Image (cartoon, helix red, strand yellow):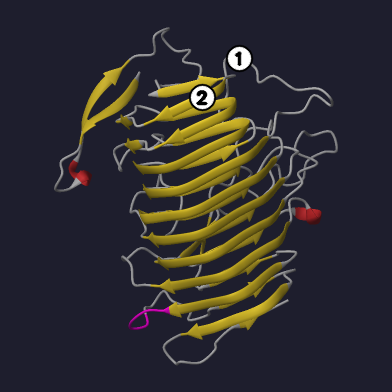
Amino acid sequence: MWQMIESFPPENFSRGFKQKPWRCPDEGDCGDGRPKNLAFIDSSEITVQGVSLVDSSDWTQLFRRCHNVLEDHVFVEGDLHWGNNDGLDVESGSNLIFSNSIFRTGDDCLAFRSGNCNPLRTPWPLKPPGFQIEPLTNVRVSNMSLTSSSAAIKVEALFQVNHGNLSNLKFDNIRITQSNRGIGVWQRDGNGTLTDVSFSNVNIETHRVPMAEFWGSGEPLVVTSIPSPCVPSSGHPNFDLKGISRVSFQNISARSEGGALFASRGQNNRGQLSQIVLDRVNITISKGGSLAPQHDYRPVEDKCTAEIVPALVDGIFVENVASIQLRGVTVGFNGQKQPGWSMQCLNATGATHVVGALKNCDNSSKQNNTRVVY
């Protein structure tokens, strides 16, 4: 029996909550799980316009293998303390436009993937030639206001081996407020390529949510590749994990509790990060709560690497990245130095190749305190 939250005490959600039960209709085999407010599967020529979707018991919207979708002027709201009430989940498809909308959800506002991240009652169909998972391509997201207790925007390949290619996703004119993570791009599984993703004209404000079930530590930007399993056999479906490439962030302004994180943790160059571009990105680290500073790699499916690594907060932390380019990037630490701050504007480590340099690094000593280790 699923337990759905009916209400929280508004003054302090940690004091408890009122539940109401919802039983799986066929007593245990729920397929995709709890009911969604809106779901389209193997559909095309879809318009969703001028509607409000609230208090979903699961993902608010699902577009699975859908094509030629237009969603405009939509309001989505879910309880900020309740997980799995994503605002929008897209699983494979092409030519999707989402614009002029407001999302406030406890879990991810917008999540995009090729394939799915849950066990399904009906097996996912494979497409010839090659019988691969259908890709996700040609996605446009613009003029959105997003608030999330997890990630406001997530582009991912997680939890299942059946992930294909993701390409040509463009996000423009986005406002992110009071979110646990701003933008996340993650690859863990599959044999596809995650490439050609751009974010432009984005304002981000993050804060750490003091609930362990929500991934994130107040980072404005996260791009990570952590292959699972760590050392697969040559016949494993995830053996040919292609990695993440050509991801750009242009004209981004962020005020955050945590720093930006770019990391690849695959062995033998599996799942590398390459051609990452930060162009006119401004990050200001601000005082947050009392939670311990850390690098948050969640989700980690194979425990060969830690999910959480205690670490001081850098402006930008780069780990084992094949290539990352900085153009007009500024980093600052706002106010009095905090115990959890490293005061490092850029900290690059491992097999990392950094092209360019910070335009400005503003810390308590007013000196460029960048540290680059190859």
Q: Residue at x 48, y 81 (%)?
A: 343
- Identify the image quadrant of the N terminus: top left
Q: Return the x and y of residue 69 as percentages of the image width and height.
A: 54, 30
Amino acid type of the residue tagged 2 in the rendering: Ile
Mark 2 burial class by Cα count in 10 Å: few <14, some 14-19, many 20+: some
* Residue depicted at x 46% and y 85%: 362
Q: Nearer the viewer, residue 22 or 358?
A: 358
Instruction: Tell me the tag on residue 24.
Output: none
Specify whether residue 334 is painted magenta. Answer: yes
104 or 175, which is in the foreground? 175
Residue 219, visible in the rendered structure: no
Q: Position of residue 3 (x, y in %)?
A: 31, 25
Mark 1 surroundings: few (<14), some (14-19) or many (≥20) residues within 10 A: few
Image coordinates of residue 20 in percent, x first then y, are: 23, 22
What SS does tag 2 mark?
strand
Residue 9 sits in which quadrant? top left
Q: Secondary structure at mark 1?
A: loop
Q: Decide: is 347 above or below 13.
A: below
Query: Of the numbered discs in the image, which one, if any, rests on residue 122?
Result: 1
**Kind of residue at badge 1:** Thr
Which numbered tag is attached to residue 46? 2
Q: Is residue 132 visible?
A: yes
- Total labels drawn: 2
Residue appearing at x 34%, y 14% in the figure:
23
Q: Nearer the viewer, mark 2 or mark 1?
A: 2
Q: Which residues are magenta?
A: 333-337
Residue 339 picture quarter: bottom left
Relative side of 102 to 309, left or right: left
Residue at the image position 70 percent from the left and 74 percent from the top: 354
Front position in the image: 66 or 8: 66
Which numbered disc, 2 or 1, marks the residue that appears first in the sequence? 2
